[in-house]
Image: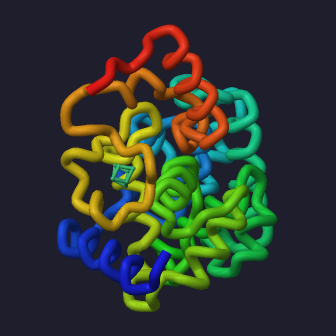
């Protein structure tokens, strides 16, 4: 992608939402850390539903440790993988108390050493709480970066590295939220809303959703970040359709 196109994409996303915010609810660095950790493989909505009940009762490492693993489990049932998330939450709180006086550390190494905290969670915390220009790549950002051509990559780390290398400095701070929200509400996995997308003329995705339902929709798969629109599968599907239903001559 040409650097001017990349810059134009971020300009439009910035103009539409100058101060993007996480949709996770939190009122302290610790609450954000817990919410992001719990959000793995689930939605922000289900995390918020769980933490709205948990945090009024226990929103410090010490208070959650006092609840214990069995005590937090009932609150985490709605977030999925609640057995391992409960275990990690208790381990995380114990480590914060023992090594960090109950505070959320500001260093990547210390964050990633916490149970249940990987690179993505650390990046979100470093970005939101400590104001660093880290770009955490989740499933939405991975899809948007590949489809648009902003930062193609085969793994989340490759996309993160490409975004860090090529995103203009002035947009890095909010790039994470702009791309995540764009992927969540516009460039969705199954049916991207291309007709109403604010960056559609700049996006390099070759299989955009047409304004009126038509043949390309019938070719659409559901599972990959490209919606199974790899050139190979498209060619195969198109060939199959042509066989069954020849295109009439104009
Ligand atoms: S034009 Fe379509 S594919 Fe491109 S970013 Fe917008 S919604 Fe996604």
Q: Residue furthest bottom?
A: 169
Residue 245 visible, this angle: yes
Q: Measuring from the top left, give residue 103's x and y in whole percent.
A: 61, 71
Q: Is residue 74 above or below residue 1?
A: above
- Residue at point 19% right, 67% down? 16
Q: Using residue 224 as the reference point, say whether residue 186 is left or right of it.
A: left
Q: Quadrant of residue 215?
A: top left
- Residue 25, horizontal then vertical, whole percent: 37, 51
**47 above or below 33?**
above
Quadrant into which the C terminus falls: top left
Q: Give residue 107's position: percent from left, percent from top.
A: 69, 80
Q: Nearer the viewer, residue 125 or 187?
A: 187
**x then y, percent, for residue 183:** 41, 50
Residue shown at 38% from the left, 61% from the top: 203
- Which residue occupies the foreground of this view, 151 or 125? 151
State the residue in front, 248 or 73. Answer: 248
Residue 3: quadrant of the picture:
bottom left
Question: Left or right: where does residue 95 sit relative to residue 146?
Answer: right
Q: Residue at x 51, y 61 (%)?
A: 145
Going by the picture, which residue comes out furthest to the top? 244
Residue at screen point 61% across, 42% down: 231
**Image position of 15 with respect to 189: above or below:** below
């Amino acid at each position: 992608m040409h650097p001017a196109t990349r810059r134009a994409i971020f300009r439009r996303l910035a103009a539409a939402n100058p101060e993007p915010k996480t949709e996770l609810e939190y009122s302290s660095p610790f609450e954000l850390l817990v919410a992001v950790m719990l959000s793995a493989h689930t939605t922000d909505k289900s995390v918020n539903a769980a933490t709205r009940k948990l945090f009024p009762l226990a929103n410090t490492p010490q208070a959650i440790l006092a609840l214990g693993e069995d005590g937090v489990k009932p609150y985490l049932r709605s977030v999925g993988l609640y057995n391992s998330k409960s275990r990690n939450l208790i381990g995380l709180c114990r480590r914060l108390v023992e090594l960090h006086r109950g505070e959320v550390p500001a260093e990547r190494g210390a964050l990633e050493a916490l149970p249940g905290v990987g690179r993505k969670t650390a990046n979100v915390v470093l970005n939101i709480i400590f104001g660093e220009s880290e770009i955490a790549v989740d499933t939405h950002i991975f899809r948007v970066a590949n489809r648009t051509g902003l930062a193609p990559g085969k793994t989340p780390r490759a996309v993160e590295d490409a975004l860090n290398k090529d995103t203009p400095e002035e947009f890095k701070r909010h790039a994470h939220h702009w791309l995540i929200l764009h992927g969540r509400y516009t460039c969705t996995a199954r049916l991207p809303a291309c007709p109403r997308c604010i960056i559609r003329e700049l996006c390099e995705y070759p299989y955009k959703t047409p304004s009126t339902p038509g043949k390309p929709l019938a070719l659409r798969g559901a599972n990959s970040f490209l919606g199974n629109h790899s050139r190979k599968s498209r060619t195969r599907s198109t060939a199959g359709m042509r066989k069954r239903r020849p295109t009439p001559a104009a």
